[in-house]
Image (spheres, grey):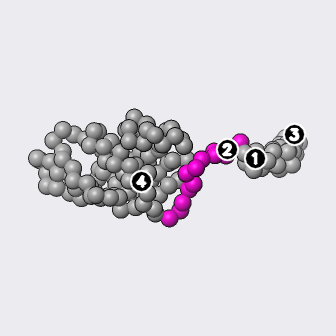
Amino acid sequence: MNKKKIIIFALCLAALLAIQIKFFLPFMYDIAASDLFLVESKDAANPMSISTDMTALAFAHCNTYIKNNADEDQSFSFPTQATNAWTLGNYEYIVNADVEISSKDSPSAVRHYACRIQYSKGDDTSGVNDFDNWNIEGVGGLTD
């Protein structure tokens, strides 16, 4: 009886694998190759660090976000421009820079942070100066 169960289990497993390879994988490849996930935008991705008006605004908005979400006793000294900034396309950016953080209880420390931010109005760049039109996806590197 045990031999029959093992053989049936192996046959069912082989059948499931064959169905997945023959039917589901080609279907998934067709979906991935389609325009279903394509986002049309004037802002193209760039794997190299760039410096544009939009990356400068992204840097300024990241700094504003950091200041707004910090403790009241902390003060920040930001550089005039980001160390690096990359565009991921569709007005989404990664900005990294150094910031000097000082407080009354501890000596000042320089932190290297990264901020992922996206402009939410797409190709309509008339509201880029308004902080409410930007979404902060995350900030890392400010804590130990």
Task: Quickly name the residue at label 2.
Answer: 37
Comparing 24 with 102, the one in front is: 102
Q: Amino acid at mark 1?
A: Ser
Is residue 48 shown above or below 11? below
Residue 1's tag is: 3
In the image, what residue occupies the spot 82% across and 49% down?
A: 26
Q: Amino acid at mark 3?
A: Met
The local secondary structure at tag 4 comes to helix
The part of the image, by quadrant, that contains residue 52 is bottom left
Residue 75 seen in this snapshot: yes
Of circles 4 and 1, the one toward us is 4
Of circles 2 and 3, the one toward us is 2
Q: Quadrant of the image for the N terminus?
A: top right
The local secondary structure at tag 3 comes to loop
In the image, what residue occupies the spot 86% across and 48% down?
A: 22
Task: Quickly name the residue at label 1.
Answer: 34
- Give the spatial CA distance, label 4 vs label 2: 27 Å
Callout 3–callout 4 Cβ contact below 8 Å: no
Comparing 42 with 85, the one in front is: 42
Q: Main secondary structure of the magenta part?
A: loop
The local secondary structure at tag 2 comes to loop
Callout 1–callout 2 Cβ contact below 8 Å: yes
Query: Relative to residue 40, is residue 116 drawn left or right?
Result: left
Closer to the chain start, of discs 4 and 2, is 2
Task: Quickly name the residue at label 4.
Answer: 53
- Give the spatial CA distance, label 3 vs label 4: 74 Å
Tell me where the magenta segment starts and ends, as one range: 36-48
